Image (cartoon, rainbow, N blue to C red):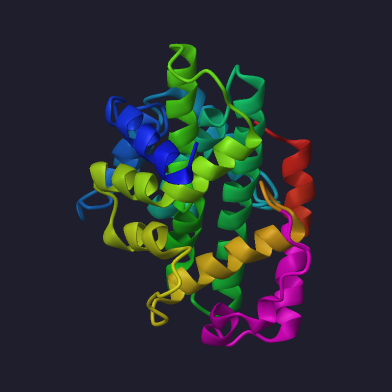
Amino acid sequence: MTTALISENMRKLLASQPIELPVFHPVALKLQSMLTDSDFTVDGVAAVANEDPALASQMLKMANSPMYMGRTRVATIREVVIRLGAQQVINIAIAVSQAAAHVSADPLLNRFMKSLWQHSHGAALGARWLTQSCGMRGAVDESYLAALLHDIGKLYLLKAIERLRGAGVIQSLDDELICLIFDEMHVEQGLRLVQHWNFPAMYCDVIRFHHAAEWDGINKMLAVVRLVNLACHRVGLGLRHEPDLDLMATEEAEILDLEESRIAELLVFLDTVRTAEGEDCP
């Protein structure tokens, strides 16, 4: 079957699937929508986060992990909001719900979901590190979320394939076919998903252009996500391992004015994340 035919068939099948597949947790979405209201309060954010005790518990666990809070521990979601700010609390809520979503009873799909989570979460942490390192401190939280969501179309596709396979619609499936579907469709489906949930345009742009040959070099957040995505491939964090990638030769490195030593530090950081993610998969 040709690539075009596979893509056409998958699009027809996906059109029959609800876009509300379990990709985003409703509490995380509710928190994200609160940011559009300038009147939100610390107590309001904490109250929404605590609507799902299991989610709130996992948020506290993640907030207290070395990758987030370090040695300073917090005991309540309200403390997290005060200490880290509303956007970081929302980031953690989405990250926690994403980790829980990257699980399947189907062994093949579960393997892909685990690798995808390692890549997405690693890219988010890497984007946060690089944004801070480049002096873009005002964009740290947004860069984290943009990187976390850049491959959300792949998760949506895996969830749709899981449902279609469970219904007997998809009979034959292997690594090559899944990768082919990803290559052809994950950008358009990811964009469709975040637009449906009214995510801000900056996240839509990252999803739309994170693989594009032509893109806006003025968009520093996009440059960060694109570079970190490549850096994850370089260290093997996720579905791909391309150890020969020359990051210094990229347009992204030039736009961000990165020295070789800074890229080397990023790769060391991501390799640490890769080891940690491998020990604590969802």
Any part of residue 72 in sight: yes
Image quadrant assignment for residue 100: top right
In depth, the one of 96 and 15 nearer the eye is 15
Q: Where is residue 92 in the image (x, y as percent from the top left)?
A: 50, 44
Asked if residue 40 lies left or right of residue 251, the reply is left
Determine the main secondary structure of the stretch shown in magenta: helix
Q: Where is residue 42 in the image (x, y as percent from the top left)?
A: 34, 46
Asked if residue 222 lies left or right of residue 123, the reply is left
Asked if residue 237 lies left or right of residue 134, the reply is right
In depth, the one of 34 and 126 nearer the eye is 126
Q: Which residue range is magenta in the image?
A: 241-270
Residue at position x 76%, y 82% from top?
261
Give the vertical position of 137 relative to 127 (above or below): below
- Residue located farthest toward the front when viewing the structure as drawn: 1
Q: Quadrant of the C terminus?
A: top right
Q: Position of residue 263 (x, y in %)?
A: 70, 76
Image quadrant assignment for residue 214: bottom left
Residue at position x 40%, y 62% from top?
206
Residue at position x 34%, y 36% from top?
11
Residue 66 lies in the magenta-colored region: no
